[in-house]
């Protein structure tokens, strides 16, 4: 009952004019950024970070939450319409979504996609609302060893992203973790790898690394590869979608939502593996699985639902434990910390009004997304006609402003440029950058939790295995690694000569 | 962000699915693995600027980065061994895969673009955000093939003023005004457009 009352108060706050406009603007920015190839919604969130300086803590979270929800869906618009995924998580949407467009069913595909995304997002927002409180009280039992174990689970989950290349993925993750050690250490106050440069002593911020790796390489590729981003013509007539059409794919939407909620709650997993796994599972379960890839609605609905179901789920570890579950929630964490708010179990006690306003905003954003999705899809074809050179120029300027805004320091711009060049080179040789970013984000957290846990237990390293929750999470992480690697191991064993 | 060809992906989700990939030059992965191995072996020697005179209690500030670099060295060595074995057996190594557009990709254009971005970042604190941004927008548009005078006039002008208003006017970010004469110009411009 208390949850309902708090949620109603949250709705009241979220429906205040300023808050509501903030959510709507964030949602539109997210959908547009997600829909534009070259600007992922994560980049949009990073670029939006400077704007949050001028906002209060709650308004900043509403703005970023709106971009997050809208951006995760937005990537599917370009994926469905022009076969170019706007975000990595939208990749499965090209397989059946674009096939539907080629059949002249673009409106039908967009309707199914936006409905599935909104359903997935709404369910996960409700899960966030009603399960966050028990999760937070459970999280109160967490101490440094458990936080370390949860961070390890987040770190190992990257293997699922590129399970066919475990060694290179691990190397990328370790490079990120090594970059995360630059600067003053969390326990002894000693600067590491500073090379006598004062600015380096305060460390390398993950937002700067992320902007450099993702945005600059993409922009350079845009001008160097002569990509034609104009929408392709379709020869069929748009089809009206009826309720029974949506109900026909309800199973796929529900399965996708379930998978998205489960994957999203794991720190570090994110929308991409959620969408890909949902597609794979649906392909196995659905009676029309063999036809997937030819424009089957269920093949589009399942990954769409899963992708947006990760948005609310990823907020659970962020708000209850202070652990970002994805790059997007890492930016939200950064925004909260900039505002002097420390997410974690105490936030639910210290500022429940803010927490439930965020919950209400997530629910509202998912409902509004249906309208925003259609509106942006309509204008998308016009926006895509913007010459790539103009688009790319503004992405560069906004990226460097985003890097500068992290600490109002030109040094971060230089760091961003270094990682921009590195990101471009990594992209050209196919070296994965996502694990590196995750390493920079989670590595320092893992170090802090590990060192303080060991120090608190008087150098007893068994503390991670003797505490039940910590031991269980580490066991899950171990099983997760095995489960992720099993298909690769199985195929390699199968290839061995008899 | 390459166009996704269903025949390339075969609808089998994997880390690289959907991008349509080709193998990078054979020596690149081995060289990269070797460089990473070398870096992870050498870097511990450069961890601290000053030599600590007294041992610290517990694990010390070097334990975690030391462990990370050790693991990095171990996996880099493993990767290097696998690459050398593949080269020795004349196998087609597939550890790294470049995007499919590799054949049509203009490296000269890409390097020029990177140069422009670096020049923009370098000029920011010297000539100030306003001038650097206007100049960058103009040069990048030209570099990207835009030749229409209206585009080349309006995009840098309106774009710069809009960005100045968004970030210095509304978000109150202390973006660089440059040094010397450039600072005076920036202050004049910011006053002229009503931000100061």
Image: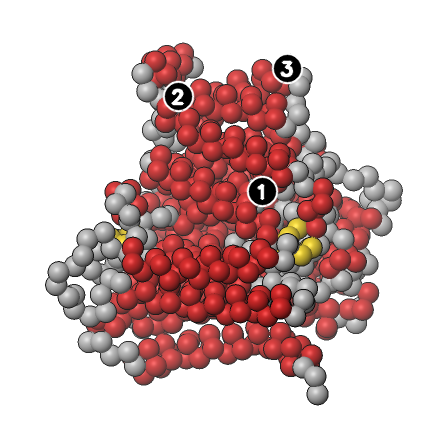
Q: Are marks 1 and 3 in contact (CB under 8 Å)?
A: no
Query: In the figure, is residue A277 to the left or right of A263?
Result: right
Task: State the image coordinates of residue A292 (x, y, percent, origin top left).
Answer: 78, 63
For mark 3, give the secondary structure: helix
Q: Are marks 2 and 1 in contact (CB under 8 Å)?
A: no
- The chain containing the residue under callout 2 comes to B
Q: In the image, are marks 2 and 3 on the same chain?
A: yes
For mark 1, give the secondary structure: helix
How much space separates mark 2 and mark 1, taking CA atoms?
26 Å
- The chain containing the residue under callout 1 comes to A
Residue depicted at x 16% and y 59%: B52
Q: Is residue A30 visible?
A: no
Query: In the figure, is residue B135 to the left or right of B188?
Result: right
Q: Which residue is mark 1?
A: A218
Q: Which residue is mark 2?
A: B127
- In front of the other: A383 or A493: A493
Q: Residue furthest left?
A: B54
Q: Quadrant of residue A432?
A: bottom right
- The chain containing the residue under callout 3 comes to B
Q: In the image, are marks 1 and 3 on the same chain?
A: no
Q: Which mark is residue B150?
A: 3
Task: State the image coordinates of residue A299 (x, y, percent, origin top left).
Answer: 73, 61
| In the depicted structure, whether residue A202 falls above or below residue B195 | below
Residue depicted at x 36% and y 30%: B173
How much space separates mark 2 and mark 3, taking CA atoms?
25 Å
For mark 2, give the secondary structure: helix
């Amino acid at each position: 009952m208390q949850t309902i009352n708090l949620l109603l108060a949250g709705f009241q706050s979220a429906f205040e004019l300023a808050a509501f406009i903030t959510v709507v603007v964030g949602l539109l920015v997210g959908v547009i950024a997600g829909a534009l190839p070259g600007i992922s919604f994560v980049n949009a969130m990073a670029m939006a970070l400077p704007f949050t300086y001028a906002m209060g803590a709650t308004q900043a979270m509403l703005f970023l939450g709106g971009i997050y929800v809208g951006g995760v869906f937005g990537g599917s618009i370009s994926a469905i319409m022009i076969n170019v995924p706007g975000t990595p998580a939208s990749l499965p949407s090209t397989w059946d979504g674009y096939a539907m467009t080629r059949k002249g069913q673009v409106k039908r595909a967009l309707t199914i996609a936006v409905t599935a995304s909104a359903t997935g997002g709404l369910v996960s927002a409700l899960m966030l609302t009603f399960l966050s409180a028990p999760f937070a009280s459970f999280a109160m039992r967490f101490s440094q060893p458990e936080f370390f174990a949860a961070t390890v689970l987040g770190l190992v989950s990257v293997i699922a992203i590129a399970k066919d290349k475990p060694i290179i993925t691990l190397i990328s993750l370790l490079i990120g973790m090594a970059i995360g050690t630059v600067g003053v250490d969390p326990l002894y106050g000693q600067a590491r790898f500073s090379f006598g440069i004062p600015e380096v002593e305060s460390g390398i911020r993950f937002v700067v690394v992320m902007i450099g790796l993702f945005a600059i390489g993409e922009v350079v590729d845009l001008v160097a590869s002569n990509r034609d981003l104009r929408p392709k013509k379709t020869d069929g007539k748009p089809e009206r979608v009826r309720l029974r059409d949506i109900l026909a794919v309800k199973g796929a939407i529900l399965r996708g939502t379930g998978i998205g909620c489960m994957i999203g709650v794991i720190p570090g997993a994110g929308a991409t593996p959620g969408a890909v796994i949902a597609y794979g599972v649906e392909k196995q379960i659905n009676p029309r699985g063999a036809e997937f890839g030819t424009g089957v609605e269920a093949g589009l609905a399942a990954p769409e639902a899963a992708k947006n179901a990760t948005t609310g789920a990823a907020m659970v570890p962020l708000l209850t434990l202070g652990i970002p579950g994805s790059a997007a929630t890492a930016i939200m964490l950064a925004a909260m910390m900039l505002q002097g708010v420390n997410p974690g179990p105490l936030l639910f006690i210290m500022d429940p009004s803010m927490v439930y306003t965020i919950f209400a905003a997530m629910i509202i954003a998912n409902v509004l997304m249906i309208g925003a999705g259609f509106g942006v899809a309509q204008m998308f074809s016009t926006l895509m006609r913007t010459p790539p050179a103009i688009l790319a120029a503004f992405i560069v300027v906004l990226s460097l402003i985003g890097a500068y805004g992290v600490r109002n320091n030109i040094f971060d711009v230089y760091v961003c440029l270094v990682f921009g060049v590195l990101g471009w080179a990594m992209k050209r040789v196919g070296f994965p950058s996502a694990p590196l970013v995750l390493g920079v984000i989670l590595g320092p957290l893992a170090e802090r939790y590990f060192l303080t846990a060991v120090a608190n237990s008087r150098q007893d390293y068994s503390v991670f295995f003797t505490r039940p929750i910590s031991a269980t999470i580490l066991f899950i992480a171990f099983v997760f690694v095995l489960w992720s690697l099993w298909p690769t191991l199985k195929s390699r064993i199968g290839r061995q000569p008899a | 962000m390459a166009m996704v060809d269903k025949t390339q992906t075969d609808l089998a989700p994997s880390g690289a699915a959907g991008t349509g990939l080709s193998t990078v030059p054979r020596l690149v992965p081995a060289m990269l693995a070797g460089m990473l191995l070398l870096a992870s072996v050498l870097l511990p020697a450069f961890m601290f600027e000053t030599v600590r005179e007294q041992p610290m209690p517990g694990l010390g500030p070097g334990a975690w980065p030391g462990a990370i670099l050790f693991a990095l060295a171990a996996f880099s060595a493993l990767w290097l061994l696998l690459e050398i074995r593949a080269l020795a057996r004349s196998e087609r190594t597939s550890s790294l895969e470049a995007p499919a557009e590799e054949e049509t990709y203009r490296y000269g254009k890409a390097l020029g673009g990177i140069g422009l971005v670096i020049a923009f970042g370098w000029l920011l604190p010297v000539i100030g955000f306003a001038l650097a941004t206007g100049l960058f927008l103009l040069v990048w548009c030209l570099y990207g093939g835009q030749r229409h005078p209206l585009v080349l006039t309006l995009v840098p002008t309106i774009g710069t003023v809009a960005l100045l208003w968004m970030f210095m006017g509304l978000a109150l970010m202390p973006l660089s005004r440059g040094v010397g004469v450039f600072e005076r110009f920036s202050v004049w411009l910011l006053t002229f457009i009503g931000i100061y």
